[in-house]
Image (tube, rainbow, N blue to C red):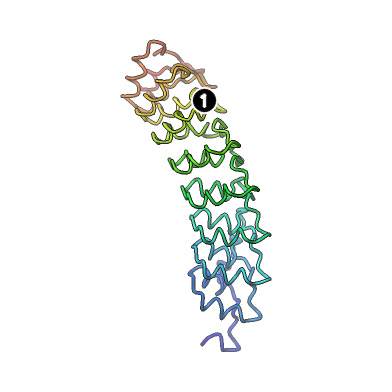
Amino acid sequence: MLLQRDEVTADKPDTYGRTPLYSAAWNGHEGVVKMLLKRDEVNLDIVDNKGYTALSGAAFNGHEGVVKILLQRDDVNPDKLDVYGGTPLYSTSWNGHEGVVKMLLERDEVNPDKQDNQGQTALSGAAFNGHEGVVKTFLELDDVNPDKPDKDGRTPLTAAAWNGHEGVVKMLLERDEVNPDKPAISSGTPLTRAAFNRHEGVVKMLLEQDAGNPNKQGIAGQTPLFGAAGGGHVGAVKILLERDEVNPDNVDSDGRTSLRCAALTGQEEVVKILLERGEVNPDRPDIYGRTPLLCAA
């Protein structure tokens, strides 16, 4: 065995900064991990070029056995940050490994609501990817804010609506602290993002539960109808236009209308639906003088 040779260094990293312990942990090799941990020169918390530790690698891939072994060591930092400001908890939550999430949450040092460099939390990551079990685990914790925004203003609800995860959206809407109308800087409200990304189920859920203003303007003045029209989501356009609060001829901060957005991206059916509405001005220019016809041309 190589580890029985005195000239072998058991903690030597490769060009990426990954040690034998890191590689064994990443691939879930419990036996190798145990052997390496018996060597005095092995540093459990040494990081690779991206700041990942052996625990980070095992957590990312959901290797519960390896995570359990590493957490039994007094010299492990279960909340160590990588270069992106993420923790092992964030990594494993992003990938939906419920067992590892629960093991890490048992440690007092682990902050379940810690934000990374972009302001995203472990709950945000789980919500973005639709991991309902992990989301449920976080929502049962008193020290987790289910409505915490990242630096762009995106909340866990926005993240779930973005990708159409109806189960997660439903869980978050049951929380009183969650504001369904909170707009992000780049993507508007959860309803706007769901409409733009063609997630009709989420759009219906938000509207049926009166979870949000269907005519609310985001940071740039765009409404959910803008998102649906620009993305060519006919179903969402029809659903939104059924609501009395929705103004089909709203303008954003640049004077653009939903019709102009649909015309620009060639959404013929949406353009037809909007032109049938008497309150829509088919020749309204934006602040640069561009009309729907010019955009289509």
Q: Quadrant of residue 82?
A: bottom right
Image coordinates of residue 122 in percent, x first then y, are 57, 51
- For label 1, the SS is loop
For the point 55% across and 26% down, the residue is 220
For the point 46% across and 47% down, the residue is 130
Q: Quadrant of residue 146?
A: top right
Q: Which residue occupies the extreme top position in the image?
A: 278
- In this picture, residue 233 sits left or right of residue 131: left
Image coordinates of residue 288 in percent, x first then y, are 50, 19
Residue that mark 1 sits on: 213
Q: Is residue 132 above or below residue 214?
A: below
Q: Is residue 62 above or below residue 121?
A: below
Image coordinates of residue 272 in percent, x first then y, are 32, 19
- In this picture, residue 165 sits left or right of residue 101: left
Q: Quadrant of residue 9?
A: bottom right
Image coordinates of residue 162 in percent, x first then y, are 47, 39
Camera-side residue of 110 and 137 = 137
Quadrant housing the C terminus: top left
